Amino acid sequence: MTVFEDLESEVRSYCRSWPVVFDTAQGARLNDVDGRSYLDFFAGAGALNYGHNPPKLKGPMLEYLAKDGITHGLDMYTVAKGEFLHTFEELVLRPRDLEYKVQFPGPTGANSVESALKLARKITGRESIINFTHAFHGMTLGALSVTGNSMKRGGAGIPLVHATPMPFDNYFDGTVPDFLWLDRLLGDAGSGLNYPAAVIVETVQGEGGINPARVEWLQGLADLCHRHDILLIVDDVQMGVGRTGPFFSFEIAGIRPDIVCLSKSISGYGLPMALTLIKPEYDQWGPGEHNGTFRGNNLAFVTATAALREFWSDDVMQRSTIAKGERTEAALTELAAESSVVELTPKGRGLARGLAFSQPELAAKSCAAAFGRGLLMETSGPSDEVMKIMPPLTITDAELEEGLAIVRDSVLATLEGVSA
Amino acid sequence: MTVFEDLESEVRSYCRSWPVVFDTAQGARLNDVDGRSYLDFFAGAGALNYGHNPPKLKGPMLEYLAKDGITHGLDMYTVAKGEFLHTFEELVLRPRDLEYKVQFPGPTGANSVESALKLARKITGRESIINFTHAFHGMTLGALSVTGNSMKRGGAGIPLVHATPMPFDNYFDGTVPDFLWLDRLLGDAGSGLNYPAAVIVETVQGEGGINPARVEWLQGLADLCHRHDILLIVDDVQMGVGRTGPFFSFEIAGIRPDIVCLSKSISGYGLPMALTLIKPEYDQWGPGEHNGTFRGNNLAFVTATAALREFWSDDVMQRSTIAKGERTEAALTELAAESSVVELTPKGRGLARGLAFSQPELAAKSCAAAFGRGLLMETSGPSDEVMKIMPPLTITDAELEEGLAIVRDSVLATLEGVSA
Amino acid sequence: MTVFEDLESEVRSYCRSWPVVFDTAQGARLNDVDGRSYLDFFAGAGALNYGHNPPKLKGPMLEYLAKDGITHGLDMYTVAKGEFLHTFEELVLRPRDLEYKVQFPGPTGANSVESALKLARKITGRESIINFTHAFHGMTLGALSVTGNSMKRGGAGIPLVHATPMPFDNYFDGTVPDFLWLDRLLGDAGSGLNYPAAVIVETVQGEGGINPARVEWLQGLADLCHRHDILLIVDDVQMGVGRTGPFFSFEIAGIRPDIVCLSKSISGYGLPMALTLIKPEYDQWGPGEHNGTFRGNNLAFVTATAALREFWSDDVMQRSTIAKGERTEAALTELAAESSVVELTPKGRGLARGLAFSQPELAAKSCAAAFGRGLLMETSGPSDEVMKIMPPLTITDAELEEGLAIVRDSVLATLEGVSA
Amino acid sequence: MTVFEDLESEVRSYCRSWPVVFDTAQGARLNDVDGRSYLDFFAGAGALNYGHNPPKLKGPMLEYLAKDGITHGLDMYTVAKGEFLHTFEELVLRPRDLEYKVQFPGPTGANSVESALKLARKITGRESIINFTHAFHGMTLGALSVTGNSMKRGGAGIPLVHATPMPFDNYFDGTVPDFLWLDRLLGDAGSGLNYPAAVIVETVQGEGGINPARVEWLQGLADLCHRHDILLIVDDVQMGVGRTGPFFSFEIAGIRPDIVCLSKSISGYGLPMALTLIKPEYDQWGPGEHNGTFRGNNLAFVTATAALREFWSDDVMQRSTIAKGERTEAALTELAAESSVVELTPKGRGLARGLAFSQPELAAKSCAAAFGRGLLMETSGPSDEVMKIMPPLTITDAELEEGLAIVRDSVLATLEGVSA
């Protein structure tokens, strides 16, 4: 481990909670160099919805490598990209009656967010963006400017000034009508709000503490954007690709965002890849106006195509995710009921689940306890008060039960320490 | 090809010059779906210094995949990352007597630039950056703000205001002493210049038209930064990893930048990966202050390690690159001498070469003519006036000659059209 | 009148509503070149609280001019400035138990606002400011950035980005607890709000439509600033110097702002002059860090001193203003009750009064009707929906009645046109 | 003096150099409360070109006050404003064949600069401005952003980012062709310069150290602006109204700026007043788009009109100013020749003169020595290295000689201390 401490920057983070050296991984299990195995309730921060090294995706990748398929293609036409586009159209867009042009904005979620913000500004000629409390959209300067966390914002070293935060759903626990503030500001020429180009929103805030927005709130937001002539950008980087059940997390609300950001699990294999989906009338880019060296990661196109075929040809995955999510919720609700010392609140949608602690520091302690029991989990939320439960969607029922039991043991052991 | 035109965004660019569908590639050759083969003087915009799918790197990657090595690791400790760090230290840093901490800032060059700018601002408490005319550093908002191209800057949709451009070497063809303007402004408390945190520079501007800075200029810049207490960031994303001969393009000047950005060819296989190298005293990041989902692309770590071992255990590659570069320069010089109609100027260093046309539009025409003859080349420069010659460093001498002959034919054929 | 149309910029504004050429003025009356007289319910936009050319102030000014007292003094020590400071201390600060250092920031209210914002940023090291919906603070770039009106903001030609608007009192008609949004954002490190240096507020918004904040709201705001370590700036440019009754408009709430902006009526004679009052612990300016050519308008110091002595040695003026304000309110309430067609809402505090029309355009029509009857009034409010009633505080009771009768006639005549 | 130290903010500045209390003033003489008299080589920082309380202007002002002429008029039509406009047209614009619309932007030079920048941005739709090294344009946020002094810029508390400084004339002592850098950047789409709306320039930099731009440089700048479609703004706040000889300081170059800023001496009596002159085709303001309470200072209009009639009906003043300037230059040149210890450099144009010291701190010492001898002078320049010689233009020849003799004595006495 010395090599990391000697050579790697102090910026490293996850490894501080999990001070072991990982080696191999399959499905919902990782193994370290000492042969210890870990169950995975983390899923690569949402980039491994199909688990580690899914065999049905590995096969096509190995074949592609074997035949020396183009690996790095920028935005050249390639067979692998063509097949991905065709499959995405056939299995994702058309069945949902969605019409989008596809941009490959670079390989990360932040690339997709950056391209979405640029395009929204170009389309409208306005510069300001509305973001939401506890939002997370990435760490490059544009994406960071619409992110809520003050420590991360401070890292910019310059004032981040082109976004105005608005209350996410339930920010006031239902005591204030939805969009009261935003709707009023937008309709008031004396409000002092810089009229925005777009709203950017996550349907379920991941880093923000696994906060789902209600369906009615999302519908209200789409309606507000329409009424005020503002673009609606859904950042589905973490919650898309089935994390909440359906392929797109916004399907549940029946809305049609103007721009959608996808990344993380889209390649299916944890390979860097991102998409920006744009309503055709808004595809107003000039050639090369946004680019990036790694926007043509053809290995990722191959595994992404295989993943769509394997998991999205029918609704088996979607139903299974919802069922596993309900089982998880039930287990967390039961656990919450057992705690008399500390208030525990189950949160989430689909297999994006969280357990919020009224004493924030206990979330990290419980995660540490879980790690000691061989389960990988991280915290999220503005005070890191939420244990984040994000297993691969492909986790088996038995593994899910095993993990939930460890969660229960870890939390109870942690609480025991508190009450003592 | 319909699938691309129907589904892909209008932002697509390279495919407009090369309207074929590529399928496979090996070394310096690509093949399209119709079985036509292309020689590669483009090298994935600098991301394929070792050519397409280099067998010595493919082997380790296939092994790693076969054993289900961790693919996606964020900043967890993994065997693959440890081996990369160890190898990088052993084969790159130590032999050059360089001491750097290594940050994995996300998988793209822009991620590295963004992290470098953030860190420089954090270290100094200043917000402004000095960049250079014709610079290119990327398309995310921070990176774009230090990029020169006005079309790409315009894409931001907001004023890009935290950088001040200064003349790159030879901007005035040697008629003005180096750094006259910058040095004076920095020493003058009434100059109106916002005192900068850092200077960011490419030693050879790639997108800027294959412009090498002279060794003395680079040394002068390092000295100026030192005298004025400003950090020096070298963006070696395109020119590093041997493109100009030595591993780092700045070695030739004997300077030691405070921060170095690496990406593109660092993985060796065209896989998304980037590094930010930081002098130990400047590694002032807090844990997690900058992060990113794909900063732990372990497949890339595997190929990067293999590439270092294969190509950087001795100086064979470096000497070969310099020799091929000289051969290329000689061929271009000869070609330039043949043109009486249009002025042709050979430019570059190592195997980053260019041929500038006094009539800019002839560069694109010559590239198109080369494509018709089975050679991939792109233009660069502020007016796209330069044919860019960037073959894989591993190109054989025979392939290089073949390509140079096509360049010659293509240029002469284009010029004939002009003189006619 | 041709000379104005030929030579003066299109930016001119009041003269478009009152297309006559004014010549002389005394007390609450102006006279035009054709000998017509106008009663003044406008008071120089609040700069003539003691009426036109008040004789008790004119005398000292004439004496000062006669003896060739220094007219223009920058920030040199002068007898006139010393007497003003002494008198201000004796008659304004000490009796109210207020301790402030006095800055002469330049001769306009905007100068005072600019200096207040700069100083708050310097003190806190933060750059952002909280302003309120419908705020007006001036037209220079800093002051404009905290102003609400979108037409005026648009005039900046650059994004105004360092302020975030919050709801002024009653923005939601009492349906939302005071400061719900602001208080929550400030206490939430994940809110995305740039933590502010200061809040800037008017106790009664003048341009914003003669909106008074409730006493409890002002007290709540002062408390919120204290709890969150934010400076409180009261812009008393229009509402200070007795307009609402007491010398400072915030006295009614018993709060002690950290910085106070004064201008408009402070000189008493309509001469350009402004003050920035700073709590001693916050007087962290370096010498000359903010300056301005006309910050030492000694004629204004002379009349300002005379005004303080004449009007603020006792509480006669304050009581009279409150009484006249109550009489005005009663008249407006009576008038409002007469209207069955359009909803009329009396607003205001002291002698800052307004009559809001549910059909905004009728306010301007009523003002035009009043002008036709020899009464000067302007509109205010985000939709110009308010007739603004701001007579000199020294108006006689008879003049006040005369004016209120004209208001009544003008409004009723206008409404007749509507119902017809 | 206690009252100032007790009550006035630490920001006060001139009074620290001249710790006496001034009382009365006439022509080129001020008197303090102790009956001591001072000769004035300062002229209210350029606001008193006609000396203190000029009798020919005082008469009309007293008459106007006596008849209760309107004092405070905002942008209402008034007799006093009409007479000023008419006279300005007749005596200033028409004889010089200049066509400008006149805006009253508020009473200070900074108001004029703010309005000029806003208008230039509105006209062009661009946000960036080109300013010059050592420029001074004012202290409000917009004006400060085009000012060079880093201490004053730092006072803003936010990054000042919408201007890029360029070298003023002679910044490189003639070793570099004029506008080499700016011209090249503007013509290069890859330069990274945000294309500017306007250039703002002083023809002689006052605060910048009494630096005159050569006539050819000013002509070159006007030509450059024309060629690149950028507006030319001349800030003639300090150097206009005859300071350099002609009414406008740019007349000497025969150029016609698109926008001109005037203030300081325009009222003639040291009263706050400013003008923005706009070429008719650029008068694109909407009504009220820029405003300000004290833009209608009618006392100032009265004295300004009287001043134009008194001093600008013929060329006596202009010729006298040039002659006095030449006499001053001769005296300074002679003095410079006497110094063997320190290099002294006479600078300036007309009666804007300076003496630069190669050891900057000696300039302040010499000014202090002059004050001890009864002469008011201040320093200027980026290192306060220049003794600034700006007497009233109406100074008598005898007074000028008296002052120059004191300058000589003071400098020589100071130098004696050095050589000792």
Image (spheres, coloured by chain):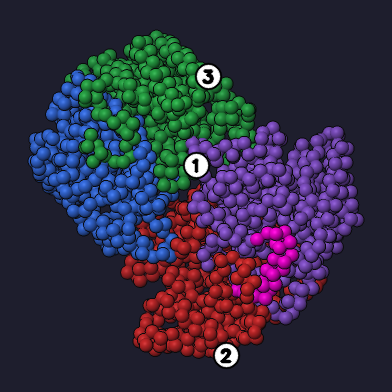
Chain colours: A blue, B green, C red, D purple
Q: Is residue D61 above or below residue A275?
A: below
SS at badge 2 = helix
Q: Is residue A346 visible?
A: no
Three-letter code for the amino acid on which mark 2 is drawn: Ala
Q: Position of residue D67 (x, y in %)?
A: 72, 81
Instruction: Please give the residue where the numbered disc 2 appears in the rendered image.
Output: C398
Could you tell me which residue is drawn at 58 percent across and 45 percent down? D227
The magenta-colored residue range is D76-99
Cα separation between marks 3 and 2: 88 Å
Q: Chain of mark 2?
A: C
Q: Residue furthest front?
A: B420
Q: How far across and how far down the image is residue A14, in percent?
A: 30, 33
In the displayed structure, B396 sits above or below B121; it is above
| Pick the front one: C276 or D114 | D114
What separation in Å lies between label 2 and label 1 (alpha carbons)? 61 Å
Residue of label 3? B253
Dot 1 corresponds to which residue?
B162
Q: Is residue C368 visible?
A: yes
Question: Can you say which quadrant of the picture contains the C terminus of chain A?
Answer: top left
Name the side, left or right, on which C312 lies relative to D124: right
Q: Amino acid at mark 3?
A: Ala
Left or right, B304 with respect to B260, comes to left
Q: Is residue C65 magenta-colored?
A: no
Q: For the point 31% across and 32% down, which residue is it?
A: B15
Q: Secondary structure at mark 3?
A: helix
Q: Callout 1: helix, strand or loop? A: loop
Residue A333 position in % (x across, y down): 15, 49
Nearer-the-camera pick, B229 or D216 = D216
Q: Is B280 left, or right, of D252 in this rendering?
A: left
Q: Is residue C335 left or right of residue D295?
A: left
Residue type at tag 1: His
